[in-house]
Image (cartoon, rainbow, N blue to C red):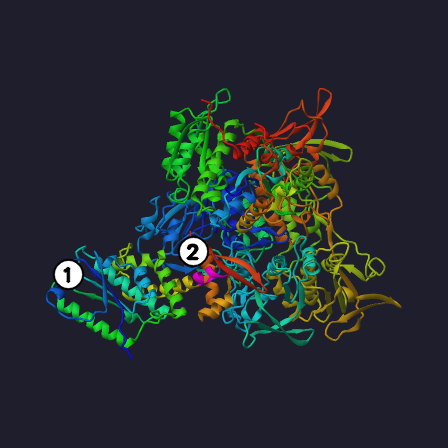
Amino acid sequence: MVEFEPKIIGFLCNWCSYAGADLAGVSRIQYPPNIRVIRVMCSGRVDPVIVLEMFANGADGVMVMGCHPGECHYLEGNLYAEWRIKMLKKLMACAGLEPERLRLEWVSAAEGSRFANMVKDFTNQLKGLGPSPLASEKPDETILASIRAAERAAGTSRLRTLVGREKELAEEENVYGEKVTQEEFDKLMDESVKEEHLRSRIYLLTKDKSMSVKELAKHLSVDTRVVLRHIVVLRRKGLLAMDRIEGISPLYVALEAR
Amino acid sequence: MVDKVGAVLVVGGGIAGIQAALDLADSGFRVYVVEDTPSIGGTMTQLDKTFPTNDCAMCILAPKLVRAGRHANVHLITNAEIKKVKGEPGNFKVTITRRARYVDEEKCTGCGVCAQECPVEAIDEYEQGLSRRSAVFVKYLQAVPSTFAIDREKCIGCGTCQEVCRADAIIYEEKDEDVELSVGAIILALGFEEFDPSLKSEYGYSRYSNVVSSIEFERILSATGPYGGTVLRPSDGDLPRKIAFIQCVGSRDAKLGNNYCSSACCMYAIKEAVIAREHNPNLQCTIFFMDIRAYGKEFDAYYSRAEEEYGVRFVRSRISDVKKVLGSQNLIVRYVEDGEPKEEEFNLVVLSVGMKPPKHVEELAKTIGIKLNKYNFCSTETFSPLATSRLGVFVCGAFSSPKDIPESVAQASGAAARAGSLIATGRGKLTVAKKLPPEIEVSDKEPRVGVFVCHCGTNIGGIVNVPEVVEYAKTLPSVVYAEHNLYTCSQDTQRTIREKIKEHNLNRVVVASCTPRTHEPLFRETIREAGLNIYLFEMANIRDQCSWVHMHEPEKATEKAKDLVRSIVAKARLLKPLKKPMIDVTPVGLVIGGGLSGMTASLELAKQGFEVHLVEKEKELGGNLRHIHYMLGSEDPQERLRSIIKEVTENEKIHVHLDAEVADIEGYVGNFETTLTRGSDKKGINHGIVIVATGAVEYKPTEYLYGIDSRVLTQRELEEKIGEGEFKARTVVMIQCVGSRNDERPNCSRICCVQAVKNALKIKELSPETDVYILYKDIRTYGFNEDYYRKAADEGVLFIRYDDDHKPKVTQENGTLKILAMAPVLKTWFPIEPDLLVLSAATIPNPDNERIAQMLKVPLTKDRFFLEAHMKLRPVDFATDGVFLCGLAHSPKLIEESISQACGAAARAATILSKKRLEVEGAIANVNEDLCSGCRICEAVCEYSAIEMKEKDGKLVSSVLEALCKGCGVCGSTCPTGAISMLHFTDEEILAQVRAALKEEKKYD
Amino acid sequence: MTEFDPKIVGFLCNWCSYAGADLAGVSRIQYPPNIRIVRVMCSGRVDPAFILEAFKSGADGVLVAGCHLPADCHYISGNFKAYRRVTLLKKLLQQFGIEPERLRLEWVSASEGDRFATIIKDMVKEIKKLGPNPLRAGGKTSG
């Protein structure tokens, strides 16, 4: 049997990590060939939607690498990357994909060997995890749908706003001059991620065909009450409408996002 | 004498508070409304429909809220509470704490972008937890003020709302602040809290998701509610097929300490069942009840309709508990009916929750210095239902006792009257009237239209290409100026509009933005300040009816916006300045009927400083009160009557006309001319308003051997007997609903149950060993009178129910009076041989009503009581301006209710009498006498009697009574010769608007 | 050929239906942009002449909307008058060669934003089936 070779996408920031990878080359440090590097100007540029898109397309792992804290070429882009990855891992967990498939590492321009070690380590870790359920010819449809929903959720203004604000809130004071504790924020984030993911799943499912609360609940293995509550919110936002009533069950259909 | 402070503080911005505020502000006082939540409107805003007319609650409420929001002399202080009350009647100093809302009320335009971008969600209390809102929120869609507020408990302080707010309205630095107000009187309209049904754990609320409270069900019914108006059940979103309503949840429950009846639940449950059925005709609704208390005006008719037309099933029962069916979300209701335990499965259970005193009421009572009753509602007395224990502090609405909307509204007006009487010397001292420049003459000038197009932040501008609309507007005929604004409603744009009017000699102004329903008054004010007549303004609604509803079609939305602007400009070109006619007011009242209501209304008017003519057809004052000898409480009604009569006769402003009748009434609001007759004497009086307080009479039964056997009496006759100390009997039987709730008179007479309980208790007091039986259909001792019902039962009064198929049988055999009554559980007839049979005879309309109604051109109900302008929100007004109604003439009611209504009618009348001249609407009907053929069709279609026929040059022509016309335009579109035009909505204007909506128009240059 | 895009004129009473249309906006309920709304104080104000003028000027459909029967009317009974008038006018329209289905009378309350949007959607669909106003198609429009 051929050994499983994980496919890894690496987003490397131009100024530190990409230079670090170059240095590994210049120094002829060997590392597994599983990584495909995409250069970005800053790790802070790595949009959660893109990362999820990679997984949807079959990546077994995604690495985001940036400058060490305090060394970011753009001052604090790497910190934003950190908050985003944290949120992404939560979303992945919701979607049923192992959060360990996503890694964030700091690699400076001088750390060629660190870069190589990271890649080695991650490759081994992924080998242990086995192939992504989305990597095969016939990807797991439930997880794929769930990742697609995560992608959509990652694009909602609610999650984007929260992620965008985490740094300020966690490190500084909020607009009232108060400190928001990390626990408070994490709790809010956890809730929001779960809710937005579920809403996105409902939204995407009803895009293809109109569905009842019960069908959705069965499909999503969630309580009907919870589904209905989210439908109420989605209708309020103009994303969902009651299509028709079949028997005693209304069917809902997604509307084009406005 | 030191003047009283001409301002009033109203605490509570629900329907009662708002009504009191408007009445006072309309009669020359400054009013502060302090509301706990961020917007006014109270519980009524959450209701879907209202009984017994099934009116949409928001439709009838919103105009009042908007009016209160814009009234120059009503100051809304929302998100605030009372901290301290000092001083004395006529001169209080009240400290209010305004809690920070973090949104500038001056700047916020209510556009809602902040809420869309806010990343934090919270439970939506307005939707009863069935939906979510954001941390920056507005209480409900049509809220007044529409200012948003930040829920500080939920907000994480991320700063997003401030960044997205284009109006710069978010202020995180805001702190709670104290405001001190000087007021002459205080009105408490605190409303109520719903009973928390989880306290009745046997019903499974909060354990089972398909057990909901009645107020949740209102939201479920509402088109603006969480389910968009489709009745769904919360467990799985399916349509329920069977709904159970359980009554008296938290009311009539001695175990909980809430022995009182919440008064409104029977009717709202029936309404909810009816409306639910309207939504879904396959639905089966069952109401589990103890007594159906449909005691109000036309309520029983509604109750029968629910049963007959909507198939609502009524089950008289006691509920044991509600259990969930194993493996299903359905519920089993276990109950006892006719002594038999039964059970039935339902898809949804609605708990009709009762009313509790408002939250933190004890603390508040202490702050204000008023006493509460044993249930923690405001303590009041029968003969002074609007006064609290502290002088100068009045009460209205559900805070004094659980009650429904019309009662609250009547009481609110009543409290306004009492407050107004107290501070009458301060009238007009603190109100503001704006100084305005003279109006510029425009009728001789070519139209010069200015168009202001609003971006509304991104609400319009994000979809409609606003600059393109502006450029387009410039190409339209008569448009000499056009510009766009970030927010046309902002204060700086108002300044710009005034400047541009001067700079470009504009004589017509068009604003293309949101809806005229909320914003027309603002812009009208603005152009008036620049010297233009207010009718030279028009609005194109390119937000609510364009950008917001065509978000995915920006190009088409832009095209539509252009069409709307073009079409409204076409109308604007034709606009004519209109004068608001002014009519003089004779500051004198006429009160018809010298019973308790008529006397109370007269006294209130006199105390407010107006002269009153009180006309009574009998030789003495007092009406029905003369026959009342004792009360349920300790008051002595005859002593009260004497003191009221004394007060009336000694008041020099009141002219009492005894033994007199109103022979004829001519004229209209502000200017009535009435002829009184007394024997052959005639007397003419001039007055500005009329209050109808003609009372009602007791039905003379033809049933149950009344008039044949002298032992058969009516309740009133029994009371006279007891009053005269002639009562003696070992056994007394009372039969309820004699002459009411039958085919001839389907409605309930309301007072007889209380009267029967009162007389039964009196009998037990005088002669404890006397057996008293009360044969009834439903015992309707609503409100706190439920206590007396319980007391009567405790003292051994036997209550035996009968239904229409098993009415009691009364016979006389060998001189013995014999009654057969059906025992409900045993289902057998059993005999009673009483010494006295007392019939609870109906209260029936005064036979004079027909004549008076005709004279005043006001309508009567099917039952021949007077019919008010609106059963819910205008309980003491007639549709005809200047004519008011109170007491039994309106419908049967208790003493305290008559007093409240009488004061209410006086307050409504004072809104007219307090003005030297009345300004009436300018956009009214106008007759071209040359074209008029005198066919009188217009006279027939006008609901307001605003058209009268007069002779001109030998022919009959119609003429509009400006004071009465409401401007609906129905006469104009009915007129066969086109003689009537509707000003401001003339045929030419509408036709131009229609044509231009469909076709391009270009400047001819 | 571009798809036929009907033009509809809507006469809406100020108190219920206009408010309902506003609510559709506040609730962001989307509907086709084919209607041009003319605000009148009461549906009873709508003169048959206004409706005929709209058809003459090329409207493919006319909507008259007022407060629900029987009791919602702000002016007590204007809605009944509208009802009688529109019913009669529908009969007349046939004689002018205009399909009566082009004229609709609906009751929309201030809380029925959804209903308003549904009516417009439905009306646009129905009128698309009917095709352009025969007066317009025949080029008989005046002015």
Amino acid at the residue labelled 2: Thr
Note whether residue B686 is visible: yes
C85 in relation to A48, above or below: above
Tell me, yes or no, whether the highlighted magenta stretch contains residue B810: no
| Tag 2 residue | B367
Q: Which residues are magenta?
A: A202-209
Do badges 2 and 1 share one subunit? no
Q: Secondary structure at mark 2?
A: helix
Image depth: mark 2 or mark 1 in front: 1
| Main SS of residues in magenta | helix
Give the quadrant of residue B122: bottom left
Note whether residue B389 is visible: no
- The spot of residue A36 in percent (x, y) is 23, 64
- Label ID, residue A19: 1
Taking the spot 31% from the left edge, 73% from the top edge, the residue there is: A131
CA distance separating discs 2 and 1? 72 Å
Tell me, yes or no, whether the highlighted magenta stretch contains residue A204: yes
Taking the spot 41% from the left edge, 65% from the top edge, the residue there is: A198
